[in-house]
Amino acid sequence: MQELQRIVDRAKRLVFFGGAGVSTASGIPDFRGGDGLYRQQFGELTPEMMLSQSFFYLHPDAFFAFYRQYMLHPGARPNAAHQKLAELERSGKLTGLVTQNIDGLHRMAGNRLVYEIHGTVHENACIDCGRPYSLEWLLGTQGVPRCEDCGGVVKPSVVLYGEAPDHYAMTGACREISRCDTLIVAGTSLSVEPAASCLEYFHGKALVVINREETPADVRASLVVRGDVAEVMGGIRV
Ligand code: NAD
Ligand code: ZN
């Protein structure tokens, strides 16, 4: 913790790169951690298959049943990690926040410099006419949500497996990572591409990894903290 505090104190441009582990303390399960969705059985199917672009188009009923049950957590609230990141942004130290999460909790905590490279459950749009719909609207529907104007399927603006990540968010994420002097990578197994490759843009001084399990970035890190993201981030003094 002392070493982490020293690194954060010295940082002039700090960027945070996070994954599902940032939100487990808010009650949202990750994929590959100890209680992750990958440990559960869904018959022959894996969460990766059910959250793929082809599954969405071929089996929209099953897609939405899975999506509603496992990916939507409307009651979840920001935890100590989200709150600390909002504080770090307000202080001017945090210059970018890159997340693979789709839960929208960083924005809810008050961060503005957020790059949601896998999109967000808060935005949805009709695949035929493009009309946008809110999460609240989607929660008020059942089964496959249909556009009120044209009857087209309303698709969540989240990046499904087989789809390209959000171009604007990805470009911004790589830009901020290439400009920062300090990068904190937390709560991610770094196994989803091309998200994980964003880290290749980092040429700063200090790379910190905070994760319960080993990650491929550990070997490059100046500091590896094996702990709970919410606890460790929450302990930083701004
Ligand atoms: P992942 O599930 O592959 O890996 C999560 C990592 O975080 C694991 O190594 C786990 O050990 C670690 N971890 C979990 N809780 C932790 C905690 N409290 N403290 C420290 N470490 C913790 O997640 P990923 O790398 O983000 O990839 C999963 C993909 O699935 C992402 O693309 C993401 O979009 C999506 N996803 C999003 C959410 C969300 O929005 N909250 C939840 C699940 C999956
Ligand atoms: Zn429509």
Image (tube, rainbow, N blue to C red):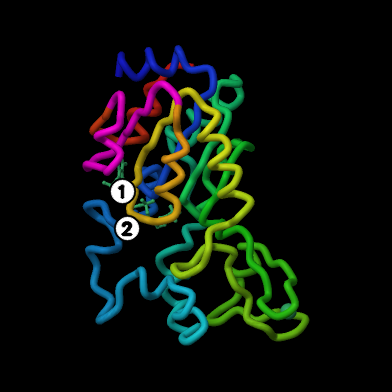
Q: Quadrant of the N terminus?
A: top left
The tag earlier along the polypeptide, 1 or 2, is 2
Q: Residue at x 56, y 35 (%)?
A: 176
Above or below — where is 218 with respect to 44? above
Residue 37: x and y in percent read 30, 62
Residue at the far right: name it: 149
Answer whether residue 221 is magenta in the image. yes
Q: Residue at x 60, y 76 (%)?
A: 141
Above or below — where is 202 with respect to 49? above
Binning the other alpha carbons within 10 Å of mark 1 as few (below 14), some (14 to 19) or many (20 upward) gives: many
Q: Which residue is mark 2?
A: 31
The residue at label 2 has a CB less than 8 Å from ligand 1: yes
Q: Label 2 sits on what residue type?
A: Phe
Q: Residue at x 34, y 48 (%)?
A: 190
Binning the other alpha carbons within 10 Å of mark 2 as few (below 14), some (14 to 19) or many (20 upward) gives: some
Q: Residue at x 22, y 42 (%)?
A: 213
- Are the residues flagged by discs 1 and 2 in contact, CB closer than 8 Å? yes
Q: Label 1 sits on what residue type?
A: Ser
Above or below — where is 115 with respect to 230? below
Secondary element under disc 1, as helix, strand or loop, is loop
Would residue 18 be found to the left or right of residue 212 on screen? Answer: right
Q: Which residue is mark 1?
A: 189
Residue 99 seen anywhere in this rendered image of the structure: yes
Residue 87 seen anywhere in this rendered image of the structure: no
The residue at label 1 has a CB less than 8 Å from ligand 1: yes
Q: Nearer the viewer, mark 1 or mark 2?
A: 1
Residue 192: x and y in percent read 38, 56
Most foreground residue, 176 or 46: 176
Q: Please provide the residue range marked out in magenta.
A: 204-223
Most foreground residue, 215 or 211: 215
Residue 103: x and y in percent read 50, 53
Secondary element under disc 2, as helix, strand or loop, is loop
